[in-house]
Image (spheres, rainbow, N blue to C red):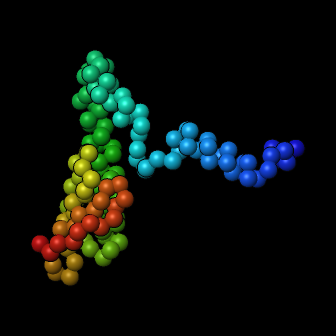
Amino acid sequence: MHITTFVKPAAVTAMVAALALTTGCVTAPDYNAYGDLYEDIYKDTKLYKKHKKTLKNIDKELYQPAIEQRAANKVSSMGYRVKDVKYKKGDHKIKVKARRGGEDYKIELDYPSYQVIKIKED
């Protein structure tokens, strides 16, 4: 027998909503509750200090290129030829230099949504 045969659908919906709220499933994208709580404590540990350079290199070599590549794909799909993409960790903007129709443009994208904030002719 299924669990739904014992419990009414309204009760199942209420249980799922309660579970989602208590487990933290209803949060903003890219939100890390544990990072907010423990980040300062973690950064003071000897282990973090010992591997700080390695962790920064991981961010620089893995995550940053992926973010920049996705931004470049977004801008090129809009009909621009991408010349340069810059993103710094912790910044909420991705800056893209692009060319279209013989004109140069500076385009700012929001991170993490990759929505266009501003297009400025250079």
Residue 114's spot in the image, x, y percent? Answer: 34, 61
Instruction: Specify whether 89 is left or right of 121.
Output: right
Residue 65's spot in the image, x, y percent? Answer: 30, 50
Instruction: Specify whether 107 is left or right of 16.
Output: left
Residue 69 visible, this orientation: no
Q: Quadrant of the C terminus?
A: bottom left
| Residue at the extreme bottom | 101
- Position above or below: 2 against 47: below
Residue placed most toward the observer, 7 or 32: 7
Could you tell me which residue is drawn at 33 percent across and 30 percent down? 39
- Position above or below: 117 against 61: below
Residue 78's spot in the image, x, y percent? Answer: 32, 74
| Residue at the extreme left | 122
- Residue 43 lies in what quarter of the image? top left
- Residue 115 lies in what quarter of the image? bottom left
Instruction: Specify whether 19 is left or right of 117.
Output: right
| Residue at the extreme right | 1
Residue 120 visible, this orientation: yes
